[in-house]
Image (tube, helix red, strand yellow):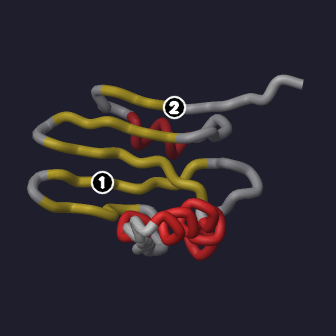
Amino acid sequence: MMLHMNKAFKADLDARDDSGNGNVEGASITANDIKEGIVYKKNGIEVIAFKVDHKSIEPAFGYRVNYKGHSVVISGDTRYNENLIKFAKGADVVIHEVAAAKT
């Protein structure tokens, strides 16, 4: 997905060049493939990635952010998932986003 972000925003990037602004630094992308487990740990902040079930997209991840004895769990659209429940246990806040299109 990240390989094509510049293509997706090409019109915006071109407009910045045409306007003389040329400030495309914010569009630079650094991406790393991740696995389940700790993906970030610095200054007391710990981010844990965990697998969720988002059929046809493999892998799909939710995240648990721990900081100073508190935690937030964030997961996008997923089916019932024991792994999500496991990582959400004891969290202060769980954000579970789901979108459904009307037909």
Q: Quadrant of residue 72?
A: top left
Image point 26% across, 36% down: which residue? Answer: 71
As helix, strand or loop, the secondary structure at mark 2 comes to strand
Q: Quadrant of residue 87?
A: top left
Image point 59% across, 76% down: which residue? Answer: 3
Quadrant into which the C terminus falls:
top right
Horizontal side, residue 82 vs residue 56: left or right: left
Q: Residue furthest right?
A: 103
Question: Which residue was labeled with disc 2?
Answer: 96
Marker disc for residue 86: none
Q: Residues within 10 Å of mark 2 (few under 14, many from 20)?
A: few
Compare marks 1 and 2 and give the one earlier in the sequence: 1
Position of residue 37 relative to residue 101, above or below, is: below
Q: Position of residue 39 (x, y in %)?
A: 33, 64
Q: Position of residue 18 (x, y in %)?
A: 53, 69
Q: Quadrant of residue 30?
A: bottom left
> What's the residue type where badge 1 is placed?
Val
Q: Residues within 10 Å of mark 1 (few under 14, many from 20)?
A: some
Marker disc for residue 47: 1
Image point 64% across, 48% down: which residue? Answer: 53
As helix, strand or loop, the secondary structure at mark 1 comes to strand
Position of residue 10 relative to residue 77, above or below, is: below
Position of residue 97 relative to residue 34, above or below, is: above
Quadrant into which the N terminus falls:
bottom right
Horizontal side, residue 41 vs residue 17: left or right: left
In front here: 50 or 98? 98
Image point 37% across, 33% down: which residue? Answer: 89
